[in-house]
Amino acid sequence: MSEGRLSVCATPIGNLGDVSARLAQTLNEADVVYAEDTRRTSILLAHVGAHPKLRSLFVGNERVRTEELVADVATGKKVVLVSDAGMPTVSDPGSEAVSAVRAAGLAMTVVPGPSAVTSAITAAGFGADRFVFEGFLPKKGKERTERIRSIAREDRAVVLFVPPHQLAEDLASLASVISSDRRVAVTREMTKFYEEVWVGSIAVALTHWVDDVKGEITLVIEPGEEVPVSDEEAIDSAGHLVADGVSASHAARQVAEETGVSRRVIYQGLLDIQS
């Protein structure tokens, strides 16, 4: 029996012309392909003339399918894992499957390829020596507020995935905390026929991107100057920790280490709130 192997494959983010020779070969040699969306992957398989068994693996069934995927590899099958576009596990399902295959001591490899993240950071022209990928912003609540605050203080370029219907709202949230002249790049439908790259200040972006847009969007935010955290922001962050059950002394110590704000100032601020 031949040794089974999992191949985690990046797939085109819009243009089938980006299929590499190695990806085509891997798909043609596969016994089974696990795909986030079998309908979209069927188009890719037809493009390269491959006819493996095709199974779904998405957020809703990832745990069950992961068990089946590991069993397939263990019995000597050549297994491929793909997402809708780009690399599985990058804001897409697949991490659980990769971890399970590794835990079982089975063979795996990665077939690199197109990436919306690296395409967007390159097209933005803000410099890509150092950047941070934040995926999708949380939809609401404390987690969203804190994530946006951290982006405002980031001195590296920040890359975000944005649902088309959420673009105007995300831009408005970012504009509330970052300087109005800080630039953003809105990249839309990269590699496709209607590819668009728009670069301008966050202030102008708010007036430009007001209507609903279509297509896949990746947003890049220009690096900013590191902004010191104010006493009020530090106390507020510590207050959230206390609300989650952390003692005031531990919350003050943790936030002080993260922000540089005096632990004594934070602790006193917490006491003032509680009094």
Image (cartoon, helix red, strand yellow):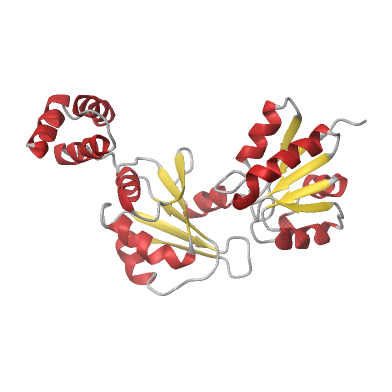
User: Quick one: 90 or 22, which is closer to the camera?
Assistant: 90
Residue 215 vertical position relative to residue 274 in the rendered view, above or below: below
Residue 119 vertical position relative to residue 204 in the rendered view, above or below: above
One can see residue 112 in this view: no
The percent position of residue 220, horizontal first and vertical second, equals 44, 53
Marks counted in the figure total 0
The percent position of residue 144, horizontal first and vertical second, equals 35, 50
The residue lying at 62 percent from left, 38 percent from top is: 96
Looking at the image, residue 100 sits to the left or right of residue 237; the answer is right
Please identify the residue farthest to the right as the structure is shown. Answer: 1
Please identify the residue farthest to the bottom as the structure is shown. Answer: 211
Residue 264 vertical position relative to residue 137 in the rendered view, above or below: above
Using the rendered view, name the quadrant where residue 256 is placed.
Answer: top left
Q: Quadrant of the C terminus?
A: top left
Looking at the image, residue 21 sits to the left or right of residue 86; the answer is right
One can see residue 213 in this view: yes
The percent position of residue 221, horizontal first and vertical second, equals 39, 51
The percent position of residue 106, horizontal first and vertical second, equals 76, 28
Residue 170 vertical position relative to residue 209 in the rendered view, above or below: above
Looking at the image, residue 25 sits to the left or right of residue 195; the answer is right
User: Quick one: 9 or 42, which is closer to the camera?
Assistant: 42
Q: Quadrant of the N terminus?
A: top right
Looking at the image, residue 117 sits to the left or right of residue 253; the answer is right
The residue lying at 79 percent from left, 42 percent from top is: 79
